Image: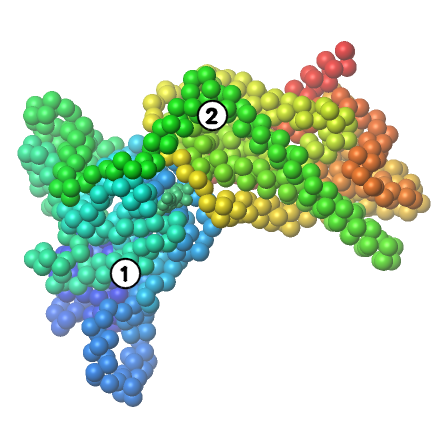
């Protein structure tokens, strides 16, 4: 608990002091040192300051300061019991040895260290996070896979670690949502130690972020990751020297294999313990792992920082939250967020005046605006540090050599696009042809199970529910699992290998014509898998307008949930030789509609200008099969979960609506028509008359609002019931089964044209509850979520009606 939460007369043992370096130093120097007992002398709820006794002195703190001190309350019993223990087992020799070694435990309290993982995109943060926490987050070889903070836990050497995997950023300026997010996490969550993951094969650029962390006066441990690649290339990386120059410890690591991870955590513990004790705060000793350095930005900038600082330092509220030096630098960088913060301070006018004066002088000295000048100074610092550490980039086995060579072909003006199309075609072709085999097995299994139950169970609603409702409904969806796994396997491979980033690069021009960014492309491709993570992946798009438009058109990307419906209907109504073209036509129509819509939206609905951006082209890497399997399986698992949840429930509901009110006298067809589902379908039938849909199709459409998979399972249920009529319906092959389904559907008057229009409607209408919720979550308002729900449904209605009417004329 926090020290501020203890009331008068209560005691506690100090566990840790958090906050940025300068603040911590001040508090620790007052005697609030880890392991010390502190007693509350006077703590009035709304009144400052609070009085404490620590190390025999009386000290007063402000409430807000005491919030940064974590304590374990000492109750009378625990006090006595710990004494009693000492009495029996206490051997002075061993207890002294214990004291000498930093251990994770203080009394009965285990030390918990909060660690945030910060770094550029694609440097291996998530790999580290997964490796130590045992989580299975997605790793990918392109920027922006991590769009949210992931929390996990780990234990090393008796300490417990709370880990936060933050989105990748190149800097901590306030340009993109991620940068702001990471900054907020660092300032507000005050992690005890920050792991700055660095791609060693790209040192100079990666260290830029490090210099900003140094400005913030945080406890940082640098992990020089991808050290294997630097070694392979023959780089000379004197990491110890570089660490010495930066004032932060550096540990070489390879998170893909786990090399260096133990060292890393040993260092984190050491640095954590060191900065919790007062004697280490003096900078004299050389053995110190960590020292706070000031990056020298040059004469005028430094003067400016000092001048701004002199105003900020008088305000205790400010000093508590931020390093004033950091604020000074950010003000000179004209950082919007920090400017807003400073504007709320009493001395705002004076501070801004000082800032403007300094900026003017900097301009005179460097002929650059202060923002650029600070950036240059930082790169100058990095360059100097690397020079001093005799850093040389090797030539052997240059990853970038192969990458450059491959990029010459893959991003070639004329070759790039055909290669891209060929790969996408290969992806879908393999998915469907290879997926056919396991699909047949599962299908046979489902049929066998259904047969087994209906042979061995007494007749009645329970048997009907199991066979027609659950097995029929869920079974018609589960058979698509293999195809979905194969599709995700392909997408994972493209992500992990680095191809996806090139695909985005190739598509950039086209995307711009749509009013989007090249960066929109990755979420759009992800949308073919599932729209929900795709919506979240749009966070990497820096321009708000492009991001919003991308989200709005994402539902038009045909997600894998729609696949079962396509396969079912296409297999039923179209000859084998046409099947793949029909399938492709759906995807293409979805894409064309998205082009049309995004042009309309960016023209008329969402205004704003396009901001330029850099597209990251990470080196090509051979992805590990383990990572690909894991990533693919994660997705498959989600699919199965959905099956066990919403799809199972919906199948039962749809079955029940069709079963009740039950009258066994009637034929199956009559029973369905007089059931609840028949009534609902009949009621909405007029709405879909222009498309020629009958009530069964209408019901299927309605059921798909929860999740599109349910459309297929609903049809499974609707037509399975009809099938119980026939005496003998064992299918020897797929085509026979589809023949059967066609007979059933044709009997209801469904023509191939109607079937195709139905597919069009399914493609375009209301995505699913989860997607709408995701849009609401990402845009922060229901407005755009509802807009998406309405426009997609209208579009679906208009397109399917138009195609049906025109088709009928021909
Ligand atoms: P993040 O964007 O920082 O979270 O990076 P990821 O953890 O997603 O990793 C990006 C890619 O780099 C993945 O393909 C990883 O398998 C790969 N990777 C991570 N660490 C290493 C490493 O130490 N060496 C090599 N060669 N590859 C790595
Ligand atoms: Mg990541």
Is the CB–ligand 1 distance for label 1 below 8 Å? Answer: no
Residue 559 percent across, percent down from the top left = 59, 34
Q: For the point 46% across and 16% down, which residue is it?
A: 414
Q: Quadrant of ligand 1?
A: top left
Q: Residues within 10 Å of mark 2 (few under 14, many from 20)?
A: many
Label 2, on which residue? 549
Q: Is residue 518 left or right of residue 21?
A: right
Q: Between residues 732 and 402, which one lies in front from this camera angle?
A: 402
Label 1, on which residue? 266
User: Residue reaching furthest top?
Assistant: 810
Q: Mark 1 or 2, which is nearer the eye?
A: 1
Q: For the point 33% across and 23% down, which residue is it?
A: 612
The total of numbered circles placed on residues is: 2
Q: Which mark is residue 357?
A: none
* Residue 786 figure quarter: top right
* Residue 793 figure quarter: top right
Q: Residues within 10 Å of mark 1 (few under 14, many from 20)?
A: some
Structural distance between the alpha carbons of marks 1 and 2? 46 Å
Q: Is residue 172 above or below residue 285?
A: above
Q: Is residue 746 left or right of residue 90?
A: right
Q: Is residue 295 visible?
A: no
């Amino acid at each position: 608990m926090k020290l501020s939460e203890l009331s008068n007369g209560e005691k506690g043992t100090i566990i840790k002091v958090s906050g940025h370096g300068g603040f911590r130093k001040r508090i620790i120097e007052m005697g609030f040192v880890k392991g010390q007992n502190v007693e509350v002398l006077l703590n009035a709820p709304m009144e400052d300051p609070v009085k404490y006794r620590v190390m025999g002195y009386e000290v007063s703190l402000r409430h807000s300061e005491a919030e940064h001190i974590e304590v374990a309350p000492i109750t009378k019993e625990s006090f006595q019991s710990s004494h009693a223990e000492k009495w029996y087992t206490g051997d002075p020799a061993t207890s002294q040895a214990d004291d000498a070694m930093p251990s994770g435990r203080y009394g009965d309290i285990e030390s918990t260290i909060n660690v945030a993982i910060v770094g550029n995109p694609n440097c291996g943060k998530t790999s580290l996070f997964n490796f130590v926490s045992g989580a299975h987050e997605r790793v990918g070889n392109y920027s922006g896979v991590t769009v949210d903070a992931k929390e996990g836990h780990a234990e090393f050497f008796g300490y417990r670690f709370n880990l936060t995997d933050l989105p990748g950023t190149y800097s901590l300026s306030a340009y993109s949502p991620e940068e702001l997010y990471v900054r907020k996490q660092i300032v507000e969550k005050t992690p005890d130690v920050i792991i700055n993951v660095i791609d060693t094969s790209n040192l100079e650029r990666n260290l830029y972020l490090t210099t900003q962390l140094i400005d913030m006066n945080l406890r940082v441990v640098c992990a020089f990751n991808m050290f294997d690649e630097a070694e392979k290339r023959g780089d000379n990386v004197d990491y110890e020297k570089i660490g010495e120059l930066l004032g932060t410890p550096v540990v070489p690591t390879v998170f893909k294999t786990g090399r260096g991870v133990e060292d890393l955590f040993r260092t984190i513990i050491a640095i954590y313990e060191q900065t919790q004790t007062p004697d280490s705060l003096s900078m004299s000793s050389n053995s110190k792992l960590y020292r706070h350095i000031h990056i020298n930005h040059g004469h005028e900038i430094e003067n400016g920082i000092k001048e701004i600082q002199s105003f900020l330092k008088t305000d205790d509220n400010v000093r508590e939250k931020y390093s004033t030096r950091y604020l000074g630098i950010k003000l000179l960088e004209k950082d919007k967020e920090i400017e807003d913060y400073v504007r709320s301070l009493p001395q705002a006018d004076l501070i801004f005046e000082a800032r403007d004066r300094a900026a003017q002088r900097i301009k005179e000295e460097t002929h650059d605006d202060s923002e650029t000048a600070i950036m240059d100074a930082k790169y100058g610092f990095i360059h100097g540090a690397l020079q001093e550490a005799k850093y040389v980039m090797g030539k052997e086995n240059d990853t970038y050599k192969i990458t450059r060579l491959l990029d010459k072909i893959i991003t070639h003006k004329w070759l790039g696009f055909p290669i891209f199309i060929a790969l996408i075609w290969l992806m879908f072709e393999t998915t469907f042809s290879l997926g056919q085999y396991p699909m047949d097995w599962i299908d046979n299994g489902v049929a066998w199970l259904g047969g087994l139950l209906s042979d061995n169970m007494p007749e009645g609603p329970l048997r009907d529910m199991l066979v027609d409702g659950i097995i029929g409904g869920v079974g018609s969806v589960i058979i698509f699992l293999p195809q979905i796994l194969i599709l995700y396997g392909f997408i994972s491979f493209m992500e992990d290998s680095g191809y996806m980033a090139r695909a985005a690069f190739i598509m950039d021009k086209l995307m711009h014509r749509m009013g989007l960014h090249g960066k929109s492309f990755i979420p759009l491709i992800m949308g073919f898998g599932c729209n929900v993570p795709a919506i979240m992946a749009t966070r990497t798009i820096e321009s708000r307008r492009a991001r919003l438009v991308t989200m709005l058109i994402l539902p038009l990307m045909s997600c894998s949930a729609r696949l079962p419906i396509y396969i079912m209907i296409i297999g039923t109504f179209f000859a084998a030789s046409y099947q793949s073209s029909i399938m492709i036509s759906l995807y293409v129509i979805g894409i064309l509609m998205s082009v049309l819509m995004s042009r309309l939206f960016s023209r008329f609905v969402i205004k704003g200008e396009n901001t330029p951006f850099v597209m990251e082209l990470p080196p090509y890497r051979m992805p590990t099969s383990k990572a690909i399997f894991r990533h693919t399986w994660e997705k498959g698992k989600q699919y199965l979960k959905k099956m066990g949840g919403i799809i199972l429930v919906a199948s039962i509901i749809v079955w029940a609506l069709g079963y009740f009110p039950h009258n066994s006298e009637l034929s199956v067809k009559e029973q369905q028509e007089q059931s609840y589902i028949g009534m609902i379908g009949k009621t909405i039938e007029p709405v879909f008359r222009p498309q020629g849909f009958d009530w069964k199709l209408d019901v299927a459409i309605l059921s798909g609002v929860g999740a599109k998979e349910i459309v297929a399972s609903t049809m499974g249920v609707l037509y399975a019931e009809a099938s119980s009529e026939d005496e003998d319906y064992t299918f020897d092959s797929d085509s026979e089964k589809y023949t059967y389904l066609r007979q059933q559907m044709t009997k209801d008057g469904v023509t191939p044209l109607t079937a195709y229009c139905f597919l069009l409607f399914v493609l375009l209408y209301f995505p699913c509850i989860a997607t709408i919720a995701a849009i609401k979550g990402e845009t922060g308002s229901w407005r755009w979520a509802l807009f998406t729900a309405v426009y997609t449904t209208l579009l679906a209605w208009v397109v399917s009606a138009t195609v049906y009417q025109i088709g009928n004329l021909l």
